[in-house]
């Protein structure tokens, strides 16, 4: 379920925005209202609050921060948050380009353009979601770029997720994690899954990474891994003698 933040100091406008958001998402969203930028920033920094979409009024009366300055700070907290500006003053439109944002909605035409902005946010979030692997480790939730993953290894009751710089651990099993990943990831051993884009050489018995590290290839997994690798080669039009294919 999406979490959506509304930062608007006019209660009438807040209700209009809420009604439009609920209608667009068929009430399947969590909406949190904030009447000031300071209140929203406090929630982000102190209450472990996060949202996927932030709807920000640009002119917040009596607040030290404008919606634009608020957006700059939200960009630092969460670069994936889709920011939609709302204003009844068109002269603010050029100023929004000082921030990373998705849409500027003129309040006089909110009924027409806010649903379009929300649809654009949905598409952007869906595209972002496909770039990450999401998992839990203890009470914490993690998201890491799929392209950063080298391989995963199951050790007893935990799975280690290896990147070039970090090793993450989770109790989630490899098959359930693989459901989030594209075909460039495959099982190469009962205890291992590998990102085929990350490898250097691939043989019947092992896979080697550019830094010299290697992981085993299980006999029963070899043919399937080989098939996935061949499909990847064809998809990317690599020459047949590419050094990434070290075995047959």
Image (spheres, rainbow, N blue to C red):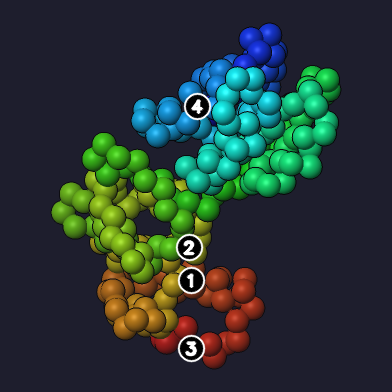
In the drawing, does residue 20 fall left or right of residue 80?
right
What residue appears at the point 38 percent right and 49 percent down from the top-left corner? 177
Among all residues in the image, which is located at the extreme top? Answer: 12
In terms of secondary structure, where does tag 1 sit? helix
Q: Which of label 3 and label 4 is nearer to you?
A: 4
Real-space CA distance between mark 1 and mark 3, rounded to the nearest whole angstrom: 13 Å
Residue 85 x/y as whole percent: 69, 32
**Residue 147 badge:** 2
The residue indicated by pointer 4 is: 38
Tell me which label, 2 or 4, sits earlier in the chain: 4
- Give the class, few, some or many, for how many residues have Cα within 10 Å of label 1's Cα (few <14, many ≥20): some
Q: Which of label 1 and label 2 is nearer to you?
A: 2
The residue indicated by pointer 3 is: 243
Q: Is residue 119 visible?
A: no
- Give the class, few, some or many, for how many residues have Cα within 10 Å of label 3's Cα (few <14, many ≥20): few
Q: Is residue 174 visible?
A: yes
The residue indicated by pointer 1 is: 197
Real-space CA distance between mark 3 and mark 2, rounded to the nearest whole angstrom: 20 Å
Residue 36 x/y as whole percent: 55, 22
Q: Residue 90 appears in which quarter of the rendering?
A: top right
Tell me which label, 1 or 4, sits earlier in the chain: 4
Real-space CA distance between mark 2 and mark 4, rounded to the nearest whole angstrom: 36 Å
Real-space CA distance between mark 1 and mark 2, rounded to the nearest whole angstrom: 8 Å
- Give the class, few, some or many, for how many residues have Cα within 10 Å of label 2's Cα (few <14, many ≥20): some
Tell me which label, 3 or 2, sits earlier in the chain: 2
In terms of secondary structure, where does tag 4 sit? helix
What residue appears at the point 79 percent right and 42 percent down from the top-left corner? 94
The reply to whether dot 1 and dot 2 touch (C-beta < 8 Å) is: yes
What residue appears at the point 63 percent right and 31 percent down from the top-left corner? 66
**Residue 29 badge:** none
**Residue toward you, 94 or 179:** 94
């Amino acid at each position: 379920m999406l979490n959506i933040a509304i930062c608007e100091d006019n209660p009438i406008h807040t209700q209009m925005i809420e009604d439009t958001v609920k209608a667009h998402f068929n009430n399947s969203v969590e909406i949190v209202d904030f009447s000031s930028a300071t209140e929203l920033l406090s929630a982000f920094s102190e209450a472990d609050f996060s949202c996927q979409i932030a709807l920000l009024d640009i002119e917040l009366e009596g607040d030290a921060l404008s919606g634009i300055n608020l957006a700059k700070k939200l960009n630092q907290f969460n670069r994936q948050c889709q920011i939609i500006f709302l204003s009844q003053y068109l002269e603010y439109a050029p100023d929004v380009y000082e921030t990373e944002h998705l849409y500027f909605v003129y309040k006089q035409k909110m009924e027409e353009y806010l649903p379009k902005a929300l649809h654009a946010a949905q598409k952007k979030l869906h595209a972002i979601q496909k770039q990450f692997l999401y998992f839990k480790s203890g009470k914490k939730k993690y998201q890491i770029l799929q392209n950063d993953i080298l391989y995963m290894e199951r050790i007893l009751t935990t799975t280690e997720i290896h990147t070039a710089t970090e090793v993450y651990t989770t109790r989630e099993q490899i098959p359930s994690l693989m459901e989030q990943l594209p075909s460039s990831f495959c099982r190469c051993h009962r205890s291992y899954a590998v990102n085929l884009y990350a490898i250097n050489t691939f043989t019947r018995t092992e896979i080697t990474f550019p830094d010299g590290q290697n992981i085993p290839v299980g006999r029963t997994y070899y043919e399937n891994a080989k098939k996935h690798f061949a499909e990847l080669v064809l998809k990317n039009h690599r020459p047949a003698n590419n050094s990434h294919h070290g075995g047959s």
